[in-house]
Amino acid sequence: MAGAPDVGGPGPAAGEQLQQQHVSCQVFPKRLAQGNPQQGFLSSFFTSNQKCQLRLLRTLETNPYVKLLLDAMKHSGCAVNKDRHFSCEDCNGNVSGGFDASTSQIVLCQNNIRNQAHMNRVVTHELIHAFDHCRAHVDWFTNLRHLACSEVRAANLSGDCSLVNEIFRFHFGLKQHHQTCVRDRATLSILAVRNISKEVAKNAVDEVFESCFNDYEPFGRIPHNKTYARYAHRDFQNRDRYYSNI
């Protein structure tokens, strides 16, 4: 998988064709219990898994970034099913989520996702990986350039490098700051899932940056905020209707 320090997969039929065999170098950090959510400590009302499921549902139903990506996945023949393609689990370390290419599943780290806004960013980030998995022959396991390209796209298009998020990180005021943020976040994401040096990860990002940074599919633009994302979704729907009528 491609990870987010903080890619759904194809539908069941397409997903089986796209599944990768397990290899020694997993793209997703080791899952504590493959496919089985870990039940957290019971709180007064909800378990951590129930909170994760509720936040996920709200994201899928209301977030404009996610709604566009879901439409794009369906349009590409990889319709996403909530129960099949998302899994709320406990994760090691500080990873917030990831795309497990071996099962075409998005893993949401219920013990690390802090709130609804965080869930929105993680689902968007991982759906971009899933979209790349659907539309291209991505070699997540052995081709570092492929992984770097998808991480650049996810950092660029998910809103992770929005001005608000960067201010909260105390990062602002630099020339071409968005590009700098995308490079840094992509490098961190690679380091979260690969046991390589920062220099190797950074070089991989640099090699693919220009072409992958300028690949805006399926948004057609950099959606700097929810308003941009809503416009992008509207344009995508209009484009889809146009081509369906030709």
Image: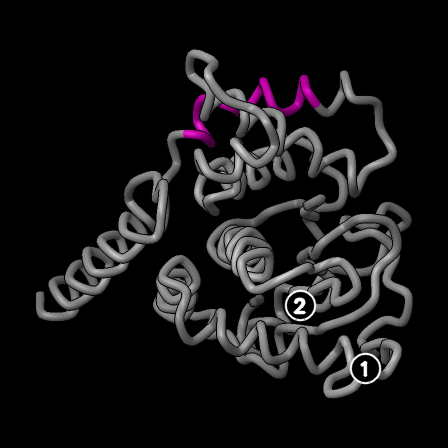
Name the one closer to the observer, 176 or 51.
51
Residue found at the far front of this picture: 44
Q: Which residues are magenta?
A: 202-213
- Identify the residue position indicated by label 1 in the image: 43
**Rendered image: mark on residue 142:** none
**Rendered image: mark on residue 105:** 2
Task: Note whether 34 is above or below 153 in the view shown.
Answer: below
Quick one: SS at disc 2? strand
**Membership of 205 in magenta stretch:** yes
Principal SS element in the magenta part? Answer: helix
In primary-sequence order, the first of circles 2 and 1 is 1
Task: Note whether 137 is above or below 83 in the view shown.
Answer: above
Position of 234 with respect to 9 (left or right) is left
Q: Residue at x 54, y 26 (%)?
A: 181
Q: Residue at x 34, y 39 (%)?
A: 222
Q: Residue at x 56, y 49 (%)?
A: 137
Name the one closer to the observer, 64 or 173.
173
Quick one: SS at disc 1? loop
| Residue 147 % position (x, y) | 65, 39
Position of 24 with respect to 1 (left or right) is right
Neighbourhood count class around disc 1 (C-alpha, 10 Å): few under 14, some 14–19, many 20 upward: few
Query: Image quarter for residue 145?
Result: top right
Task: Note whether 56 is above or below 47 in the view shown.
Answer: above
The amino acid pointed to by label 2 is Gln
